[in-house]
Amino acid sequence: MAFTAAVTDKIKTFKDLQDRCNLKKTNDINFFTEWIEDLPDLTDDEKTEIASIKEIYDYQRLDGFLLEGTINLLIISPLLRLAGFFEPPYKIRSPYGVELEIDDPEETIRGFIDALVIKEQLWVLVVEGKRNGIPVAAALPQLIAYMVSQSQQRIIYGLATNGDEFIFIKLETGEDAKYDYSTTFSLLPSRHELGRVLQILKKLGTIITLS
């Protein structure tokens, strides 16, 4: 598909996303409330698991930035399991087979669409950020463009992470296509937000199942 190739070659910024895909970020604060409202409580076991993921990540992170495969092993797979995405009715398609590159004045960031969950309605992108200070948000234009090009669903959700940061995305396709994204959740501080990330994943899983 020609448009698919153009994603990695042409879509680098939100301006590119607007010009080439006719896709704009909505200003409607009620469009993407799934990451804020009615989040499920975590069980004591889930809280213990989250604390363990954080401890292991901190240890492995001591030597510097982690590669995509390591982030998947340490964080993404455990989170998807805790959120219930390894169980019926969900299906995992991984790896999905597209590499994204985000140009930076000093370095290129590489990302990979690493997990596609149930009916193309939840995408997970892991970004390898090799230089300090590159936010995971830099990968969002390409991720959103690829979601548009590959899915037939009306509503699609995404999660982008470099291990340190997590951002959720909601995309509505169609004639009046639009998107919005969540705040950035951080795993680095002692008062980290990985539990919130799990809560949102569980909430999105419920929405996808009912759709």
Image: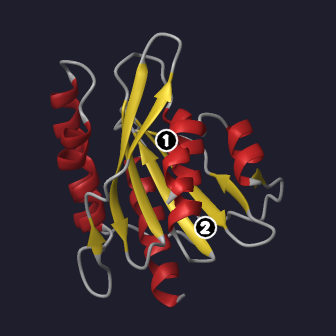
> As shown in the figure, which amino acid type bears the numbered disc 2?
Glu
Figure label count: 2
Q: Which quadrant would residue 94 be assigned to in this image?
A: bottom left
Question: Looking at the image, is 141 positioned above or below residue 154?
Answer: above
Residue 169 located left or right of residue 194: right
Residue 162 located left or right of residue 49: right
Q: Residue at x 61, y 50 (%)?
A: 182
Q: Residue at x 61, y 67 (%)?
A: 34
Q: Residue at x 31, y 69 (%)?
A: 43
Going by the picture, which residue comes out furthest to the front?
Answer: 2
Question: Looking at the image, is 208 positioned above or below residue 79?
Answer: below
From the viewer's side, name the closer residue of 89 and 56: 89
Question: Looking at the image, is 81 positioned above or below residue 5?
Answer: below
Q: Which quadrant would residue 37 be assigned to in this image?
A: bottom right
Residue 97: percent from the left, percent from the top? Answer: 31, 54
Is residue 44 something one can see in this rendering?
Answer: no
From the viewer's side, name the closer residue of 199 and 74: 74
Residue 108 located left or right of residue 46: right
Q: Earlier in the sequence, mark 1 or mark 2?
A: 1
What's the CA distance linking mark 1 and mark 2? Answer: 29 Å
Q: Is the C terminus in the top left, top right, bottom left or bottom right quadrant?
A: bottom right
Q: Residue at x 49, y 60 (%)?
A: 1
Q: Which quadrant would residue 71 be assigned to in this image?
A: top left
Question: Looking at the image, is 48 positioned above or below residue 84?
Answer: above
| Callout in the foreground (1, 2) | 1
Helix, strand, or loop for circle 1? helix
Mark drawn on residue 34: 2
In this figure, which residue is indicated by the disc labeled 1?
Answer: 8
Helix, strand, or loop for circle 2? loop
